Amino acid sequence: MASVYIHIPFCERKCQYCDFVSYVGKLECLDKYVDSLINEIKSFDAIDIDTVYIGGGTPSLLSEKSLSKIFDTLNKYHHLDKNAEISIECNPNSLSEEKLVAFKKVGINRISLGVQSLNNEVLKSIGRLHNRAEALNALNLAKKYFDNISVDLMVGLPNQTIQDVVDDINALCPLVNHISVYSLILEEGTPLYDRVQSKQVILPDEDETIAMYDTACKELKKYDFIRYEVSNFTINKPCKHNIAYWTQKDYYGFGVASHSFVNGVRYSNTESLNDYLSGVTCVESYSIDQKIAKEEYIMLRLRMSQGIDMKDFSMRFGESLETKKDIINKLIDDGLLCEKDNHLKLTDLGFHLLNYVVLQLVD
Ligand SMILES: C[S@@+](CC[C@H](N)C(=O)[O-])C[C@H]1O[C@@H](n2cnc3c(N)ncnc32)[C@H](O)[C@@H]1O
Ligand code: SF4
């Protein structure tokens, strides 16, 4: 079984912090883009698919006709498992009752809504097109049709306070069963980066951002949301698609700037919309050697709260983590790692220092 990611690189407006591959002012290309997607999907031998993730960009901009074309192609050329998890990323302002009905019709069964914050001032300062009321309306509408709903929240945003985070979680938890919480990454080249550099915008400092994240974790716990990955929390439905990435299963990425990982080889598609529209797909591929596979295993397994299964590690890589006992013991003494039932896991403090811990464990 494999996972499929489909990238829809179009947005109505570029958010101030975003450096994902998504184009603004090119919505007239959407139909042609879907035709190119279909050609790419058809070009592969039949894949057994158990998760599909339509991400972006703003996939909720897709029309019912485009969605039907995509799913007709997946069903005709590949084997889409009848219990497959099929997610779509949505923005509150491009979600309507009509869209939700269309999603259901093609078999989508999970909605991931980009909320980011419910404070109107914060939303404005990061250039979101929606306000609090629109986000909550979109969620309530989605609830009429779907029972598997996730929202994305961000912390460390301009004008955001710890109390905002508490309020957001209190308003959102009763409406959803999954929340992703991301600390703002200030990406060079984004408008927000420039505004921070020129001191037009002051961001919360690192300690405040960490406090916001810890507050989010504490509040989520009150609603029985379990942290199953560094940025992901759920009451009962972890995202199967993302778990497939973190456990290094095969996945196929279709669309501009998407990546695939099949039989130990990583493939990258072109980031140029024009090239993709004229039929260019994969522009780079390389095999993952044992050293990289091992480093990625350590990094990806530590992201998940179940951690590294040390027996599984030894079986896969023919070596034991016992060789790193001194480093592991130091990380345990520093309160960053813990060992339980032959699994190595990050502590709450360790989750904040994931990159540091990974660097210590890979050499
Ligand atoms: C692929 S994005 C697209 C989702 C959707 N287009 C939206 O914005 O609502 C998925 C999520 O990544 C998060 N994200 C995007 N840029 C980020 C950044 N610079 N730092 C932290 N999180 C970011 C946001 O929470 C966003 O909802
Ligand atoms: S809507 Fe999402 S993908 Fe589009 S610019 Fe904003 S954060 Fe990026």
Image (tube, grey):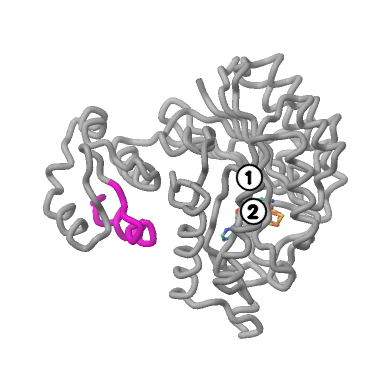
Query: Does the residue at mark 2 contact the one at mark 1 (Cβ under 8 Å)?
Result: yes
Q: Name the foreground residue: 50 vs 178.
A: 178
Above or below, 44 relative to 214: above
Q: Which residue: 25% across, 40% down? A: 343
Residue 98 lies, in percent from the top left, at 87, 36
Q: Is residue 24 left or right of residue 309?
A: right
Q: Name the foreground residue: 102 vs 218.
A: 218
Q: Main secondary structure of the magenta part?
A: helix
- Residue 258 tag number: none
Q: Which residue: 50% across, 68% down? A: 212
Residue 304 lies, in percent from the top left, at 39, 44
Q: Mark 2 points at which residue?
A: 172
Asked if the stretch drawn in magenta spans residue 250, the answer is no
* Amino acid type at image mark 1: Val
Q: Which residue: 47% across, 53% down? A: 221
Q: Is mark 1 on a helix, strand or loop?
A: loop
Asked if the stretch drawn in magenta spans residue 358, the answer is yes
Q: Distance between the residues labelled 2 and 1?
A: 7 Å
Magenta range is: 345-363
Above or below, 214 relative to 241: below
Q: Name the residue under label 1.
A: 176
